[in-house]
Image: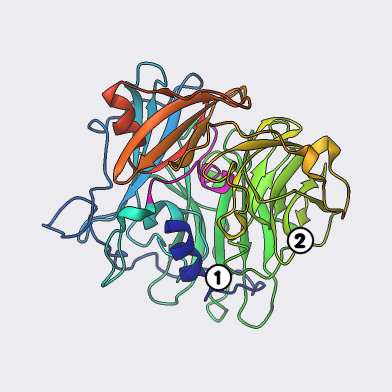
Amino acid sequence: MREQRRHLHLAALVLAVTVPLAGCGGEGGAPRNGESPDGGGEKGKRSRQSGPSRGDGAIPAKGVLVKAWCTVPANNPAEVTVEAWNPTSWKQVGSTTFTLPAQTVLTDDDAKTPLSELCDDGMIEPGETDDEEDGPNGLAEPRLRQLFNDDFSKLAVVLRDSGTGGTRAAVVTPDGRKTMLTKGGESDFADAPTEQHPVFAPGSGGTEVWYMTKGKEDETPRIFSTKLSGGKAGTPTARGSGDRLTWQRPGFTLAGRPASAITASVLRVSPNGRKAAGFHELQGMNVVDVPRRATTQRDDDAPLYPLPGACRPWAWTDNSTVLCGPRELTEDDPARKNNFWTVDTTRLRKEETASEGVMGKPILPTTSRKNTLRALSPDGRQMIITSRQGPREEHFRVATEPGSTPKKIEPAGADQALRSGFVLEWR
């Protein structure tokens, strides 16, 4: 599966704490070359690019499904395209494209960035071929959505200096403007900066960006935030230290208002930002309360409310109900295999295994189809899934109530909208 392959790729990467911030020197450097998703007579690989031709239309504030995808041509700058689709007519109603600076980090080999997951679909490793068994990408985790500001007019990236190897966090716009999150160092004799993993704080209007730094000798990263004003970044504010990062902790996700950084993975945040469900290393899948202050929450900082059974949290249908799908390593209930169900988190208990009774009944009919959650409506009552039978993929809309009957989505535009890339939100 795509997720397992990505986890294996990330397993070798362990991040640590900061060295003093300094300037990168020049910002030049060769592009990070990858394979074009649709060109050059590439064999054994599907085209990852889909949808109508790109334009400069704004992304509507509501009533649309927003997806993003990344292309990494061999000899041209990489691009990130954001598209908005009407989830009823399945017509594209907006689009914007970010042409990335040549020195943008696109893989976790150089620095941690959620952009690497988005762009992994746009390139292949040497000797690797696309696996038809991967299936579609599931609903993106919030950290991918947090690469963008609220209206998708800004994108947070990491830039690597080819001379020093230093990395700087930055914000770019579709028109090519670039804003660094910190000022360059005053000394010519200093460590290269190690900024990485920049993400926008939800609801900040694109003015607040969090990022982290790492060092080679220490085990924990330091996390900072900064305010953007008038095209410039303000003074960074230290937010504390995160956990030692592994493939099980791919970075951090922001939750709540004011924002807090949570270092668990597979993380999903409740609509009101008060709770988060995710994987805490060596602790399994849990729900935690989000602090009501700007801070950093590590795996062992808060009481854990274990999720029962084989639940992998995919979303929240309301402020207290988690939408679950099966975890592949713990599938032991035939009725829940390839299915979805809900968990009432108000009935979970601290540090205790929850009873089976807190789980809702399966939402879909029991079949051998392989089903992937692609999007959840803003009110949590409807979801869009892609269902596979062998090589055939079909899209369905279904209520999130137990025993619901999926209704096939007929318009051809749905396939263009859902065939590739990541759905970031249904707004």
Residue 338, position as x, y percentages in the image = 51, 44
Residue 274, position as x, y percentages in the image = 78, 37
Left or right position of 180 against 51: right
What residue is shown at x 26% (from left), y 72% (from top)?
Answer: 127
What residue is shown at x 27% (from left), y 55% (from top)?
Answer: 77
**Residue 75: in magenta span:** no
Secondary structure category for the residue under label 1 = loop
Q: Which residue is more in the foreground, 278 or 148?
A: 278
Residue type at mark 1: give it: Pro
**Residue 139: in magenta span:** yes
Residue 195 is drawn in which quadrant?
A: bottom right
Compared with 385, 208 (above or below) is below
Residue 359 is drawn in which quadrant?
A: top right
- Give the residue at mark 1: 193
Residue 258, position as x, y percentages in the image = 75, 40
- Give the residue at mark 2: 299
Residue 229, position as x, y percentages in the image = 59, 40
Give the mark count. 2
- Looking at the rendering, the stretch of residues picked out in magenta corresponds to 135-150
What residue is shown at x 84% (from left), y 55% (from top)?
Answer: 302
What residue is shown at x 70% (from left), y 71% (from top)?
Answer: 220
Residue type at mark 2: give it: Asp
